[in-house]
Image: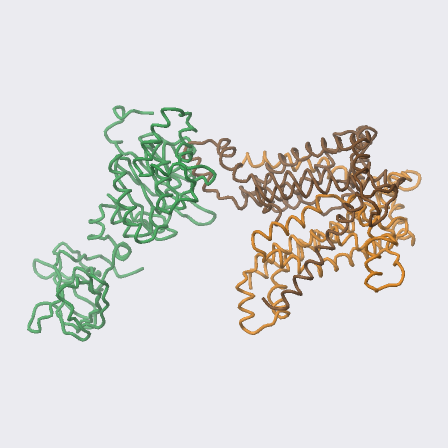
Chain colours: A green, B brown, C orange
Amino acid sequence: MESRADRSVTTSAEVELDDIAKRFGATDVLHGVSLRVEPGQLVCLLGPSGCGKTTLLRILAGLAEPDRGRVLIRGRDVTRTPAYARRIGLVFQNYALFPHMTVRDNVAFGLDARGIRGGTAAARIENALTLLQLVGLDRRYPRQLSGGQQQRVALARALVLEPDVLLLDEPLSNLDARLRQEVRDEIRAVQRALGITTVFVTHDQEEALTLADRIVVLRAGAIVQSGAPLDVYRAPRDLFVANFLGDANVLRGRVCRAGAGAVFVTERGLELPVDAGASDGAAMLVVRPEAIVLDRDPDAVRGLAGSVESLTYRGPTIDLRVTLDGGERLRVLETLPGREDTHVAQRVRVRWNERDVVVLPGAASG
Amino acid sequence: MNDRSILFRAVTVAIYAFLLLPIAVVVVASLNDGATLAFPPKRVSLRWFGAFLTSRQFIEATWVSLEVAVVTAIVALVLGTAAAWALARRAMPFGFIALQYLTSPLILPGIVVGLALLQFAARLGASGSVGVLVIGHTVVALPYAVRAMHAAFTQYDETLDEAAATLGARPLRTFFRVTLPLVKPSLIAGGVFAFAISFSNIMISAFLVGPGTTTLPVRMYNYMEFSNDPTIAAIATLVVIAMFGAVWALHKTVGLGGFFR
Amino acid sequence: MMRAWLLLSPAVVFLGVFFGVPIALVAATSFVGKGGVIALDQYRRFLLDGFYRSFLTETILVSVVTTAACVVLSFPVAYQLARARAAMKGVLLTLLIAPLMVGDVVRGYGWLIALGDFGVVNQMLMRLGLVDKPVRLIFTPTGVVLGLVEVLLPFMVLPLAAAIGGIPPALEEAARSLGARHARVFRKVVFPLSLPGLAAGVVIVFALSMGSFAIPLFLGGVKVNMVGPLIFQQATLTVDGPFAAAVSCVLFATSVLLLVAYAWVGSALRAEAGGR
């Protein structure tokens, strides 16, 4: 195995997937996916069910073999290496704790498999248990633990082996809402403390946005966009990503040049100024509900005129449906304080900051 | 609960009574004091148990039966577990047919198996040996082992084995440290059942026994032909106690789920 | 995958060598006619001679009656077992499985005593006033049926109970809440959904009773002509290898036909159940 010093400058990635393709029966589940993960990064594979994200994870883990492509971990080609010979740790969605072993024995399992026993093993086990706050539970059996505790054991069991990469399959989906926040913070803290390269898979955009350093959005076996959560959220590259991460208001129309700048003309003829960089032709204007500003001043003149069609209180926020006079319908999200008097049929003016919209090329599809 | 439920339960109890009738009769008959079988016994004694324990022929036959049963159980379990694992865990072509094939001795007439092995062994000059008995019994016991283990492996959570692999365990270690312990109940149930099937077997044994390798059931049958005394009842009672005890112990330790398919 | 074949082969080969080959040899032997030539003599003898054919018909008759009785008797038991609480289930299963493990000799012997002229059954019948003098049960078809039903009942109960166990109790409760009485619930809900288990039980019990040996031998003696004891007698006493082989092959063929019919019916039932 190459040491860090041997590796050439270009291959600094901890994990590299190169043109991975996989077919199950008659279906192509992955169409040549390539991905690099830098050391210490927490990367999320995000996508709807059936997009291939779990298959990709399993290929990374060595539980499935790709039909084409290579898997490299720390520069070493492990494509044909079986799972037990790779230095990865995998936390399953159902935790897969060995029911006939205590917490301690579960954590010790991998060390035992490697021939690490006695004092050395005990020390490492203690560290792992302490890190995951499992001290005192070590003699219990999995069935005597709560869901959150079981997950911590699964994590400890994987981390005690100091793997090169940590993999997590839908880590928060089995937990109730209350627990999710706690566990999310714990995973983050542990990952940071150890600096371990981590890849996790989820279909939940909130999980992705809150946990990841980098989000990789997958759809139908291919990567559609990859980047920091904020970037992917604010600058989705297509409608699918815009809708999958957060909510999006979409106006269809075309971009036309107007002097030095550009104008977006909706289907109904509404003209909206857009960034000069937008290219001509059929386009979609995407603006997030929380980026829309509603001016309730009856004397206001700036912005598009419209009225409130419906509203829902969601505790700290109000969720409104506003219909513009031109007929377009928008979803708006506002914080509650100061806006308790909002009512249906209220006349408003809709404004937003140009920076907060995204213009996507092409006619709306999908 | 309504009336009908009571009637229903009464009927079920009656059927169970019917099911256990011959066994109950045998146990009561074994306590007979007289030399001929009288039912119900006029006087009670354990002398026939003593007759069994002091009979060299019967004790020898018991040893043969035990020996054969233990070996049969082991062979059936080893063969059956391996085959069941392959069929349950891998998508094998003709897998369904293979499963039917392996469990076919269950409903194909045991008597034909006995005859077939008798003629086969005779040709090879191996009739009357312990080996032939083991082989014959294993043919009949194998389906039970395969069925029990196949059900266990089908229900088994494969992610556990995958987890073991990601933790660095090679396939053999995974099998012995993770898989096997978790299918232990079925393994034990299958083994006990195979043992019992072999021990009590008359259909195959009747054809395959020879001088020096007579099993207990065959010896009992021969005895029944010319004698009417309750020794047989005593032996039968001991077998009943042993088997009921074994099943109850199974129930208390690993559970009887292994049979429930 | 290679590993899977390696694991599967020992069992398959074992059965092939010690089950398949011997059976093939028996089949071959059965075609040996008088004077050692290859002929259908033995089959002709078994199937055309009235005396021997009666063995086949009697065996079929006994098996049919036994299977029918098992079907009727096993429903209450299977239903109770399937719906029992955990504690009770263990007891019920023990009472069902332990007799299976005790063996035919023990049970046959028990029946021998019970069915005698002064055995338990007769004593009970007379005490209940149902008969004046003892009914002859030993060495009659009735006695054989009684014995076979008792021995084979668990084989019907277990698959049936497994099938009933798969019917969600909510279905029955729903039917009852719609006003159906017990008989109707049984006819419309329980019975149809338990058919796969019932089919399995019927095949097993019928096949086992066709090939039964110990019970017919003990309880039927020479008065009840069944195929199992016939084979044994021909093989060991009169040592007529070819004839015993022919009888065995006929018996074997009926069992194989049953297996095939079961597989065919079974898949049809499964397809229908899936569609429902």
Judge left or right: residue C108 versus residue A126.
right
Residue A92, given in percent of the width and then of the height, sits at 39, 43
**Residue farthest right in this picture:** C35
Q: Is residue C4 visible?
A: yes
Judge left or right: residue C254 versus residue A213.
right
Query: Which quadrant would the C terminus of chain A be assigned to in this image?
Result: bottom left
Q: Along the line of sight, which residue is nearer the eye, A352 or B190?
A: B190
Q: Is residue C27 visible?
A: no
Residue A285 lies in quadrant: bottom left
Name above or below for residue C121 compared with residue C231: below
**Residue farthest front in this picture:** B43
Residue A173, given in percent of the width and then of the height, sits at 35, 50
Q: Along the line of sight, which residue is nearer the eye, A9 or C256?
A: C256
Q: Residue at x 26, y 61 (%)?
A: A363
Name above or below for residue A181 compared with residue B222: below
Query: Which quadrant would the N terminus of chain A be assigned to in this image?
Result: top left
The number of numbered badges drawn on the structure is 0
Residue C248 lies in quadrant: top right
Residue B29, given in percent of the width and then of the height, sits at 80, 46
Name above or below for residue A319 compared with residue C38: below
Q: Along the line of sight, which residue is nearer the eye, B234 or C101?
A: B234
Residue C182, given in percent of the width and then of the height, sits at 62, 69
